[in-house]
Image: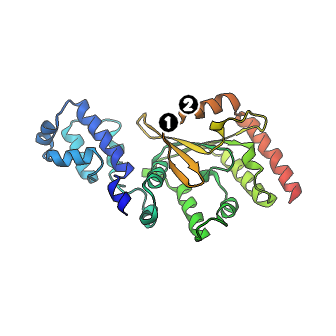
């Protein structure tokens, strides 16, 4: 737990950033904020840097005293304070988790929009159960594959604050051809078609003829959050999920604008691929 204790939780850091922006927006110094709220300067500084974890009531008191309780972002800040360590389902995992992975998973859970790009593999939020089982069957070190499956289920189902989440998928056709078992891949394609029919998801494909370049060769996500313009990007590697070094929105926009098929063309291609897989199985 040493690393996790030294690095403030990303929810705490985001909340602290929003509170600092708010205090600066209303033009209060630390001393003036302390006088207005009744909290001491040291506590305010710890909260704004993520090292303090205020309760929802304390956050609301700050916003009331700052006279911004009616601002659109106020409810988001209060809501963030209800999950200082992320979703409850993550609690048993934290002792063995690196801070970058922890913050990546928490950011994904908090996002209202997840733009997920998959090249060699189907993104986790779009994986069907047979596909997930296959990917995790031979992982090292030894582990319980059922735990991996349950974690993916939690990631797919969790909705922070009960909010709707929109899943925007761009998947290269290469990801549909890398699994040799046709029954498993057929189940995955059916799942993608089911997602494509949902109002809270969009599924598009990049055809095999699209040019290959370095930025397309890995999976990544671009996350958006309610009521704020902030974005967080996640990257995937052989080591797993982590916060990306920078904003990957430009890469997403490039792939989306220049190489991605329309929703209808993607659906047609998925149906063609499903027919081929069904004939093989």
Proximity of marks 2 and 1: CB atoms separated by less than 8 Å: yes
Image side of residue 75 versus residue 275, left or right: left
Q: Where is residue 60 in the image (x, y as percent from the top left)?
A: 25, 46
**Residue positioned most to the right:** 279
Q: Where is residue 263 in the image (x, y as percent from the top left)?
A: 70, 36
Asked which secondary structure carries label 1, the reply is: loop
The C terminus appears in which quarter of the rendering? bottom right
The disc label shown at residue 247, or none: 1
Asked which secondary structure carries label 2, the reply is: helix
Image side of residue 184 versus residue 123, left or right: right
At 50% from the left and 43% from the top, the residue drawn is 244
At 53% from the left and 56% from the top, the residue drawn is 155
Instruction: Bin the neighbour count of mark 2 within 10 Å (Cα to Cα): few under 14, some 14-19, many 20 and up.
Output: few
**Circle 2 residue:** 250
At 58% from the left and 64% from the top, the residue drawn is 148
Q: Position of residue 79 (x, y in %)?
A: 35, 49
Q: Where is residue 139 in the image (x, y as percent from the top left)?
A: 63, 65
Give the answer, above or below, for where 70 lies relative to 258.
Answer: below
Give the answer, above or below, for where 181 lies relative to 15.
Answer: below
Quarter location, residue 16? top left
Instruction: Bin the neighbour count of mark 1 within 10 Å (Cα to Cα): few under 14, some 14-19, many 20 and up.
Output: some
């Amino acid at each position: 737990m040493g690393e996790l204790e030294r690095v403030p939780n990303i929810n705490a850091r985001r909340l602290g950033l929003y509170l600092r922006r708010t205090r600066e927006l209303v033009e209060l110094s630390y001393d003036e904020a302390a006088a207005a709220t009744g909290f001491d300067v040291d506590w305010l500084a710890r909260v704004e840097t993520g090292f303090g974890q205020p309760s929802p009531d304390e956050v609301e008191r700050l916003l009331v005293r700052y006279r911004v309780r009616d601002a659109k972002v106020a409810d988001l800040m209060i809501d963030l304070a209800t999950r200082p360590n992320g979703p409850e389902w993550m609690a048993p995992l934290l002792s063995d988790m690196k801070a970058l992975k922890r913050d990546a998973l928490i950011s994904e859970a908090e996002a209202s929009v997840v733009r997920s790009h998959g090249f060699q593999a189907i993104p986790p939020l779009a994986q069907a159960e047979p596909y997930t089982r296959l990917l995790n069957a031979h992982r090292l070190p030894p582990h319980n594959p059922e735990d991996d499956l349950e974690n993916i289920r939690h990631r797919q189902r969790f909705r922070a604050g009960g909010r709707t989440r929109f899943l925007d998928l761009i998947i290269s056709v290469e990801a549909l051809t890398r699994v040799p078992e046709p029954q498993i891949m057929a189940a995955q394609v059916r799942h993608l078609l089911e997602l494509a029919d949902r109002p809270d998801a969009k599924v598009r494909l990049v055809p095999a003829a699209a040019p290959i370049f370095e930025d397309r060769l890995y999976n990544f996500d671009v996350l958006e959050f309610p009521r704020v313009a902030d974005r967080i990007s996640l990257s995937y590697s052989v080591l797993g999920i982590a916060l990306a070094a920078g904003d990957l929105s430009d890469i997403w926009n490039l792939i989306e604008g220049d190489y991605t098929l329309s929703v209808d063309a993607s659906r047609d291609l998925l149906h063609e691929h499903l027919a081929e897989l069904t004939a093989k199985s």
